[in-house]
């Protein structure tokens, strides 16, 4: 046989391709993507076969042998290996860190296949044969009779223990061909507990309405074409998008394909996942649907991964990282709530799950279906330009009206109450009314922003950067207002530049203060607060949600994490305490986020047979994000917002890259950030526009100072590899760390 030589990416914390010879006996089963054990210096390490072929710069006779092939199937199917290479270039990170993200830790440590042996009847005995066996070998007959009564194969160890027999008894029956022994992988199933005592969910599909049918038919044709394509499903809240996803999934599975179903957050919404899963398993004719998210135990993750890699399971549902599940013959990727920032990972590798989904679909020749009631402007423009197909659901399934959005002007409220109010009179009355009718209320506080912008509580004026159209940030240390994009700065005003009032500093409220305020006005109500502080345990979160569902809580106060994909029929009032927090964060996406938040929140109210009401409190009621959201006018909002984006050359018209520098010495940090910026300007100035460097919004974290630099560009795929090359050659001092973030979703 000819010598087979492979290039291996070691999973050993460095980014290199090493070459090995493959022993003859291993050659048939080994291929690109195989997980192997190879000698490196004096130890054995795991690695992924990246290519087949000889190195150009190394004498072949000195190559070592591959020591072991861990699984008889590829650990990274070819589309995933291609995806890893694309990600390494696009996001400027090491291939090793991506492979590490793609393959579960247990696999990376070379965990074997855990198997158990089963016994089943292979051939029925006639009554005479059985009678003969009773006499000659009573133990064997006993085992035979036991197995004959079982519907399915039984675990060998358990059966033998129960009958008090030795393995020799089973072996004798196997030898005669009466019993067969088979091996099966042992699996742990995530959320098995929810299945057991959770709500029983109907696996019955709905009859499609006309719009859904049109969408389903279109997806059928797209899938039938058998090639890459992206479809954006824009359907208002409650229009039944999930049903369209499920039909498309059924089509893909029936055609023998595999499916990835991404949702923004799995751990927080077990009931949604349980429901999906039971439907998916019904569609997939009983084959397993793997659930995949970051809270799985190692064993659970390994089992799910193996089931997919071996082709035993063909559907996976999960959060962001499920996009790397080793689904075979991938045919369809569904990304639900594609606009969600949660799809972006905020640590290395800083990838965007939706964008990676589109790329994986491309590499696998599969179809990607993106769905949302409020599509990201990136996806929307791709649909407008014809790059993506567009499907629309404009009606709610049962023709229920969208809830009424009532905007309370806090400027007037502040004048009336003579203090800064957390709860307006209108909101209080609405809550009292709900309490009397035994209906429920959710109060949202969007606490993600920190209110260091300047907002006048008299007139609603917000100080913005003239060049960047984002809110300026107030820096307490030197009483300045600064722009985080272009570094413009000036002294902070003492009075509002528009109306002259001195009330120009408004700090947003926390969940705790709102909870206290609710207790004062509704002393008899059962109130629960839900935020990162009170919900440090994942079970606590589920507990509160199930109490709320059971009607044991009247008012739920929380950050927007309670809004995600939850469906509470008895909630007829939703209050957004402070819309300004999300609207005036220093981020050009602030309007988009606020619009999304309002529309999504409104979609949660009154999902049962009762109409819902949404009350939005704000100092800036005239803001477009608020006005367009009142009628869920996505098209209107998109048109006006895209005009601003085009005027300022923001995404989706250009890509944005963030570069963060961290270090203990502020002068040194500034110096190197500036030197670096000069170098980039000189080398790539024709392809990127730089803004900064400037101190980060949070200038110092844990004794480390932070500076940042922004690049705007049309061509990420050309610019990022260049930046990565320059960065590798630049003489960074040891105490400065820096991080590149391509297509960041949060600027604030
Ligand atoms: P969204 O578009 O907001 O994701 P969902 O898919 O969650 O909407 O559907 C909203 C509700 O309508 C769900 O309870 C779903 O079971 C139900 N539903 C979906 N399609 C139909 C239909 N054709 N007929 C009746 N009910 C439906
Ligand atoms: Zn600016």
Image: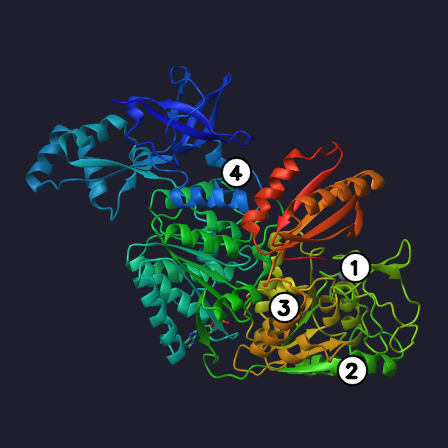
Asked if labels 1 and 4 touch by Cβ distance under 8 angstroms, the answer is: no
Mark 2 or 3: the one toward you: 3
Asked if labels 3 and 2 touch by Cβ distance under 8 angstroms, the answer is: no
Q: Quadrant of ligand 1?
A: bottom left
- Number of marks in picture: 4
Left or right placement of residue 64 versus residue 489 in this view: left
> Mark 4, residues whose alpha carbon is within 10 Å: few (<14), some, or many (≥20)?
many
Mark 4 or 1: the one toward you: 1
How far apart are labels 4 and 1 at the CA level?
Answer: 35 Å
557 or 337: nearer the viewer: 337
Q: Is residue 8 above or below residue 303?
A: above
> Mark 4 vs mark 1: which is more N-terminal?
4
> Mark 1 vs mark 2: which is more N-terminal?
2
- Residue identified by numbered label 2: 425
652 or 73: nearer the viewer: 652
- Residue identified by numbered label 4: 95
- Residue identified by numbered label 1: 483
Residue 349 in sight here: no
Residue 739 in sight here: yes
Image quadrant of residue 228? bottom left
> Mark 1, residues whose alpha carbon is within 10 Å: few (<14), some, or many (≥20)?
many
- Residue identified by numbered label 3: 646
Q: Is residue 377 above or below residue 433?
A: above
Report the residue at 45% width, 68% height from top.
386
Q: In the structure shown, which secondary structural element does the residue marked by tag 3 occupy?
A: helix
> Mark 2 vs mark 4: which is more N-terminal?
4
How far apart are labels 1 and 3 at the CA level?
Answer: 20 Å
Where residue 27 appears, as percent x and y from the top left, is 30, 27
Q: Is residue 322 above or below residue 403?
A: above
Q: Is mark 1 within 8 Å of ligand 2?
A: yes
Where residue 575 appears, as percent x and y from the top left, is 69, 75
Q: In the structure shown, which secondary structural element does the residue marked by tag 4 occupy?
A: helix
């Amino acid at each position: 046989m000819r010598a087979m030589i492979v290039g291996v990416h070691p999973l050993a914390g460095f980014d290199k391709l090493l070459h090995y010879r493959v022993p003859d006996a291993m050659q048939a089963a080994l291929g690109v993507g195989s997980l192997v054990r190879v000698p490196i210096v004096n130890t054995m390490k795991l690695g992924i076969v990246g290519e087949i072929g000889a190195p150009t710069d190394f004498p072949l006779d000195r190559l070592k042998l591959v020591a072991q092939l861990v699984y008889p199937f590829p650990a990274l199917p070819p589309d995933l290996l291609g995806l890893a290479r694309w990600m390494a270039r696009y996001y400027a990170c090491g291939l090793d860190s991506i492979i590490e993200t793609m393959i579960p830790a247990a696999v990376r440590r070379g965990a074997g296949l855990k198997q158990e042996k089963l016994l089943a009847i292979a051939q029925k005995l006639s009554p005479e044969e059985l009678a003969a066996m009773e006499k000659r070998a009573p133990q064997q007959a006993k085992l035979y009779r036991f197995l004959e009564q079982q519907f399915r194969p039984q675990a060998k160890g358990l059966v033998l223990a129960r009958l008090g027999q030795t393995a020799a008894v089973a072996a004798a029956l196997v030898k005669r061909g009466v019993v067969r022994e088979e091996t099966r992988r042992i699996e742990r199933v995530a959320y098995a507990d929810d299945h057991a005592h959770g709500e029983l969910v109907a696996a019955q599909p709905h009859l499609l309405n006309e719009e859904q049918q049109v969408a389903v038919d279109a997806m059928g044709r797209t899938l039938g074409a058998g090639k890459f394509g992206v479809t954006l499903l824009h359907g208002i809240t409650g229009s039944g998008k999930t049903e369209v996803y499920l039909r498309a999934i059924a089509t893909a599975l029936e055609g023998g394909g595999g499916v990835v179903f991404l949702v923004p957050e799995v751990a927080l919404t077990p009931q949604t996942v349980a429901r999906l899963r039971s439907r998916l398993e019904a569609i997939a004719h009983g084959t397993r649907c793997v659930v995949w998210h970051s809270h799985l135990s190692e064993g659970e993750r390994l089992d799910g991964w193996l089931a997919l890699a071996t082709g035993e399971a063909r559907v996976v549902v999960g959060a962001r990282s499920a996009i790397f599940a080793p689904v075979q013959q991938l045919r369809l990727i569904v990304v639900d709530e594609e606009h969600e920032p949660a799809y972006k990972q905020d640590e290395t590798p800083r990838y965007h799950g939706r964008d990676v989904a589109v790329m994986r679909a491309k590499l696998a020749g599969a179809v990607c279906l993106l769905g949302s009631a409020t599509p990201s402007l990136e996806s929307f423009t791709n649909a407008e330009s014809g790059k993506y197909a567009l499907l629309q659901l404009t009606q709610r399934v049962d023709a229920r009206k969208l809830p009424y959005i009532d905007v309370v002007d806090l400027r007037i409220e502040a004048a009336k109450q003579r203090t800064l109010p957390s709860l307006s009179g209108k909101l209080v009355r609405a809550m009292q009314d709900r309490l009397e009718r035994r209906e429920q209320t959710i109060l949202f506080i969007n606490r993600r922003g920190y209110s260091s912008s300047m907002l006048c509580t008299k007139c609603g004026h917000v100080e913005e950067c003239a060049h960047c159209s984002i809110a300026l940030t107030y820096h307490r240390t030197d009483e300045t207002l600064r722009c985080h994009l272009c570094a413009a700065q000036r002294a902070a005003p003492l009075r509002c530049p528009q109306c002259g009032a001195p009330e120009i500093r408004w700090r947003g409220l926390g969940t705790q203060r709102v909870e206290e305020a609710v207790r004062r006005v509704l002393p008899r109500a059962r109130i629960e607060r839900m935020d990162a502080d009170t919900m440090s345990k994942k079970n606590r979160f589920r507990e509160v949600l199930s109490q709320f569902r059971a009607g044991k809580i009247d008012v739920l106060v929380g950050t927007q994490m309670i809004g995600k994909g939850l469906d509470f029929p008895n909630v007829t009032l939703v209050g957004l305490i402070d819309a300004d927090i999300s609207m005036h964060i220093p981020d050009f996406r602030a309007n988009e986020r606020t619009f999304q938040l309002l529309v999504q929140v409104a979609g949660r109210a009154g999902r049962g047979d009762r109409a819902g009401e949404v009350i939005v409190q704000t100092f800036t009621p005239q803001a477009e994000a608020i006005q367009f959201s009142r009628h869920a006018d996505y098209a209107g909002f998109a048109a006006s917002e895209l005009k601003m984006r085009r005027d300022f050359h923001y995404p989706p018209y250009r890509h944005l890259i963030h570069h963060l520098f961290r270090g203990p010495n502020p002068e040194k940090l500034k110096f190197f950030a500036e030197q670096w910026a000069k170098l980039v300007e000189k080398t790539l100035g024709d392809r990127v526009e730089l803004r900064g460097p400037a101190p980060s919004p949070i200038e110092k974290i844990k004794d480390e100072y932070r500076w940042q630099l922004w690049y705007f560009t049309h061509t990420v795929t050309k610019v990022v590899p260049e930046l990565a090359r320059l960065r590798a050659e630049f003489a960074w001092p040891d105490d400065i760390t820096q991080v590149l973030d391509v297509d960041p979703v949060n600027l604030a």
